[in-house]
Amino acid sequence: MEYEISLLTIMGISIIGALSLNIIVGFCGQISLGHAAFLGMGAYTSAILTKMGVPFAAAVLAGMVVAAIFGILVGFASLRVRHDFLAITTMGVAFLFLGIVRKQEFLGGEMGIAMIPDPGLGKVGYMILVLLLALAVALFSIYLKRSWMGFTFDVVADDEDTATLIGIDVSSYKLIAFAIGTAFAGLAGALYAHHVKFIDPESFNFVESITVLSMVVIGGAGSVWGVIIAAAALSLFPMWFQFIDQYKLLVYGGLLCAIMLFSPDGLSGIFTRSLANIRGRESNASG
Amino acid sequence: MLFVNLCMQGLLQGGIYALIAIGLTLVYGLLRILHVAHAGLYTLGGYIAVIVTNTTGSFSLGLMTSMLAVGLVGMVIYRLIYQPILDKPPFVALIASIGLFIALEEIYRIIFGPYGITFAAVPLQGAVNFAGTYLRECEIAAVLLATLLIAALTLFTKHSRIGIAWRATVTDPEMSQSFGVDVVKVRYLNFFIGSAMAAGAGSMVALMNNLVEPTMGSVPSYKALAIIVLGGLGNVRGTLIAALVIGIAETFGTIYLGDYLDRDSIAFAFLILVLMVKPTGLFAKG
């Protein structure tokens, strides 16, 4: 039972992480290859603060704020550089984060931080907390997508120049997307730190960034349900099927490649198309 | 003396980076694809070089086989992965490429084992006194190979008919097509040459470290991306200069910044700094 509880907690954290990236990549169309860095910032902030005796909730909140501040800084980069340049810049940010953390004594260096305090909710309580937060982030994502801000993000993602032309302040919306997305990333990171009780630079390396990105892409960038399903499935599969654990990365890599080749808009794209197919057939049959 | 030594180590490192990064920038210049999986070919080059050298006893044969075979693999990758998604938005190819790269590393791990393979008898290890500092023969060979390949590439693109057609295609694919250039052949050639150069780099690094492991390409892969962005994406001369600059910045940075930053993030710190000042890289085209 304990194993299943841990599994569901990790699943909830993955969903929050993937949804947070979905706001930047899916809603606002800004590619980010360094999302794990923001999870890391949330995790490190919260871990250090709780070790200093700050209450759990306040520490997690601080983690979100720190991640969002750095997120806005990287957002400024997205105003300077676009597309491929932005992809490489965000990747650079992730490597820079790891490079700095590895050398800092007070961040634990290569050894990482161990014995991160337990939030004192019990395993089941913590799982429920994480799942509730995941639900909240999901609801917020759906609300955001349908709000005016969501529509504006859509325009920015679709065609930045046209967005500017019709009077949208593209820069502020990009910064807002980065701020919200990275704040939730900080939340996911902090929750992760208090779940596993140990973090080191390797927990937030480039492969983790790609893992989060693959959840978004496989689910279908921009689709909240697609991303939730992909995040849940990808975080649970390797643990259910222990035998593929060794080939986890091969499966990730292969899936990413295959989805891009056959359905660049992910699971949600497959779903929408097959739905359209079925409807098309029905209307053909009736007409 | 430390200064000269560091400069030479930096240039050596830069030469290796240049060999990897030029293939990447060629692909970007022609197809606007960030070919992350390129470093997977660099690793494959190392593996083939070690295996062929160990079976035949000749490193030069190993190097040639590796460059030829990996060049062909590069063409296959273009055909299977990139050609079907050329008309999709750029991030599609980028993510497919990252996926392919992760998968390639795992395939190497499964086939060749996680601990890497080494030369049975390592050639070219003697030390040579060079302007007061010692260089190993293999390091000199690496610099020579890099110089040779880059010079050959320059001559080829400047003076041969195929090279001229190639450059024309990079500048304006549609126009060169209407002048009778077979654009698809140019792409295959591009992938062949770029991948073969990466294999050359992989073979030399295998020789210098006497080790090829599945993850050998991870760090160069992302660093090469930083280099081609610095060089102005698609600009071969800019890439060459950026590679040497990064090589030297890293060797000096490790000594002077080592307490604050680890070696592998120096290139990225430099990159972010430059991009904030000049968003199109050091040597943008046009």
Image (cartoon, rainbow, N blue to C red):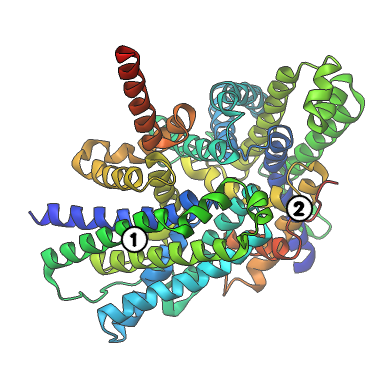
Kind of residue indicated by mark 2 = Ala
In the image, taking residue B47 as reference, residue B136 lies left or right, namely right
Query: Eyeballing the image, is A8 above or below A239?
Result: below
Q: Residue furthest front?
A: A287
- Which residue is disc 1 drawn over? A140
Task: Bin the neighbour count of mark 1 within 10 Å (Cα to Cα): few under 14, some 14-19, many 20 and up.
Answer: few
Q: Tag 2: Cα neighbours inside 10 Å, few (<14), some, or many (≥20)? A: many
Q: Position of residue A54 (x, y in %)?
A: 29, 85
Depth order, front residue of A246/A65: A65
Measured from the top left, where is residue A281 in percent x and y? Answer: 33, 17
Q: Chain of mark 2?
A: B
Who's the residue at 69% across and 43% down the image?
A: B21
Where does the image place residue B157, in percent across and percent down from the top left?
85, 29
Q: Is residue A47 visible?
A: no
Please name the residue that numbered disc 2 is placed on: B242
Q: Is residue A95 above or below residue B33?
A: below
